[in-house]
């Protein structure tokens, strides 16, 4: 086998491994983590919703049960599918609201909340605290499962 063929086979194998990895982790909700040994603050902590409301001129309201906050961008194809799924879930489940934020127009918020790619979905509880997040396009079942854990 020539050197070019070996390089081609290795490149295809690496692409397949990367594709399998992305297929496993995309859209999966991961809980937020606590820092070990962290002391609970005495003063009230600014909620994720407070940060979103202050840095983005949101027209949405905080849902009574949960709020699905989607960060998307204009060039993102999976963002359209995520928008439909989250909108349908918000209509289907009482007390749940869906809010979409354009990441390109709210870079300060994206940096502050730690968004690294679009679409990213945050699940906020009724008090505005982030409970979990998913990078990538989640399925309807993944969203419903994340909401059921609240």
Image (tube, helix red, strand yellow):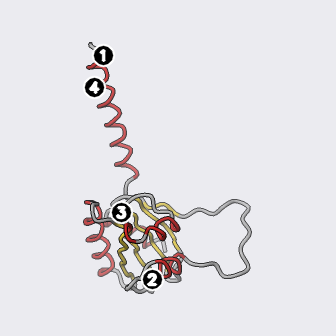
Q: CA distance from mark 1 to mark 4?
A: 9 Å
Q: Which residue position holds label 4?
A: 8
Could you tell me residue 80's position as x and y percent? Answer: 25, 66
Q: Could you tell me which secondary element the residue under label 3 belongs to?
A: loop
Could you tell me residue 20's position as x and y percent? Answer: 34, 42
Q: Residue at x 35, y 33 (%)?
A: 14
Q: Residue furthest top?
A: 1
Q: CA distance from mark 3 to mark 4?
A: 31 Å
Residue 94 drawn above or below residue 17: below
Viewer-nearest residue: 73 or 20? 73
Residue 136 drawn above or below residue 86: above
Question: In the image, which disc is placed on residue 16?
Answer: none
Q: Which residue position holds label 3?
A: 119
Could you tell me residue 4's position as x and y percent? Answer: 27, 19
Viewer-nearest residue: 144 or 41? 41
Q: Which residue position holds label 1?
A: 3
Could you tell me residue 51's position as x and y percent? Answer: 52, 77
Q: Earlier in the sequence, mark 2 or mark 3?
A: 2
Q: Residue at x 30, y 80 (%)?
A: 92
Mark 3 nearby-residue class (10 Å; few <14, some 14–19, many ≥20)? many
Q: Residue at x 69, y 59 (%)?
A: 36
Mark 1 nearby-residue class (10 Å; few <14, some 14–19, many ≥20)? few
Which mark's residue is nearer the viewer, 2 or 4?
Answer: 4
Q: CA distance from mark 2 to mark 4?
A: 51 Å
């Amino acid at each position: 086998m020539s050197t070019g063929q070996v390089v081609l086979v290795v490149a295809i194998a690496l692409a397949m491994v990367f594709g399998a990895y992305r297929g496993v982790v995309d859209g999966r909700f991961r809980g937020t983590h606590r820092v070990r040994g962290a002391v609970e603050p005495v003063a009230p902590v600014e909620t994720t919703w407070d940060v979103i409301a202050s840095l983005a001129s949101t027209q949405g309201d905080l849902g009574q049960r949960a709020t699905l906050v989607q960060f998307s961008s204009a060039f993102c194809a999976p963002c359209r599918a995520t928008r439909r799924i989250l909108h349908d879930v918000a209509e289907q489940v009482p007390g749940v609201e869906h809010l979409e934020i354009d990441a390109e127009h709210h870079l300060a918020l994206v940096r502050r909340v730690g968004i690294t790619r679009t679409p990213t979905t945050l699940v906020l509880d009724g008090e505005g605290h982030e409970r979990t997040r998913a990078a990538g396009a989640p399925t309807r079942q993944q969203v419903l499962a994340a909401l059921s854990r609240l």
